[in-house]
Amino acid sequence: AQTVTQSQPEMSVQEAETVTLSCTYDTSESDYYLFWYKQPPSRQMILVIRQEAYKQQNATENRFSVNFQKAAKSFSLKISDSQLGDAAMYFCAYEDTGTASKLTFGTGTRLQVTL
Amino acid sequence: NAGVTQTPKFRVLKTGQSMTLLCAQDMNHEYMYWYRQDPGMGLRLIHYSVGEGTTAKGEVPDGYNVSRLKKQNFLLGLESAAPSQTSVYFCASTTGTRGREQYFGPGTRLTVT
């Protein structure tokens, strides 16, 4: 079974600064998808960004970008120009390559944004 | 367009009681999922469905049953609740095409005393 590891339980960043959240995963597959989801205090899970393993180009969504290192099985999330609204739990997730698109989640990183 | 809704939002049960959590989606999604979220453990898959009338076990299925009689609804049942089932439960759905976003409901906080 695939495993997803987030080794940083908590991170802190000052407003307007940049922070990077780490994620590593274990798989024997070559074609898969990786995701970052955000869970603010409201508890609602929100997709932040998605990366297809076959695409070498790192995904970018506005202030959010990833550093995808396929050989190292690493998928970090960079948040630029951090805002107070970025404070949340962030979960890295791996999509199963079978037919059911099942997700395996990491344990999450709680991001605090300070003034 | 409500997306994914869950009923109820909160519930307290006594050990041994039963209950059903209802998940409904209005996006015509094929795939639906039930996860539980516990502190320090992320989200873990309980059961899932790839279409009306189908269900399958996920990572932590023991103590739960599911049914998907209609495409838009996915029910999660606890036949005899245990304190270990105290958790926040999330339902999610997606189109059935690989790599697509899963849309999550707002969650149900269940406490078993």
Image (cartoon, rainbow, N blue to C red):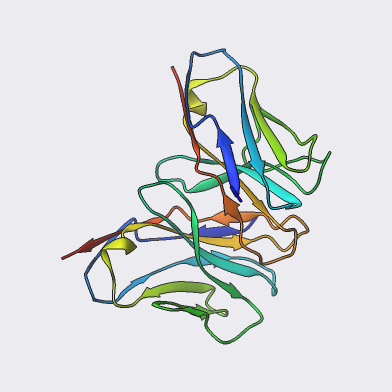
On the picture, is A51 further left or further right than A21? Answer: right
The structure residue drawn at horizontal position 82% and vertical position 42%, both measured from the top left corner, is B52
**Residue A10 in view, yes or no:** yes
Corner quadrant of residue A102: bottom right
Q: Residue furthest front?
A: B1
Query: On the rendered image, what quadrant is the C terminus of chain B found in?
Result: top left
In-image side of B19 versus A17 (left or right): right
Q: Residue at x 67, y 70 (%)?
A: A32
At which x and y percent is residue B8? 53, 29
Q: From this view, report whether residue B100 is shown above or below residue B79.
A: below
In this rendering, does residue A110 appear at all? no
Quarter holding residue A70: bottom right
**Residue at 52% over, 59% down:** A4
As drawn, B15 above or below A43: above
Question: Outermost residue toward the left?
Answer: A115
Please, is residue A83 above or below residue B13 in the view?
below
* Labels in figure, total: 0
Q: Position of residue B65 (x, y in %)?
A: 70, 29
The residue positioned farthest toward the right in the image shown: B53
Where does the image place residue A93, in percent across and percent down from the top left? Answer: 54, 60
Residue visible at 42% across and 46% down in the picture = A43
Q: Position of residue B44 (x, y in %)?
A: 56, 45
Please state which of residues A40 and A21 is positioned toward the viewer in this rendering: A40
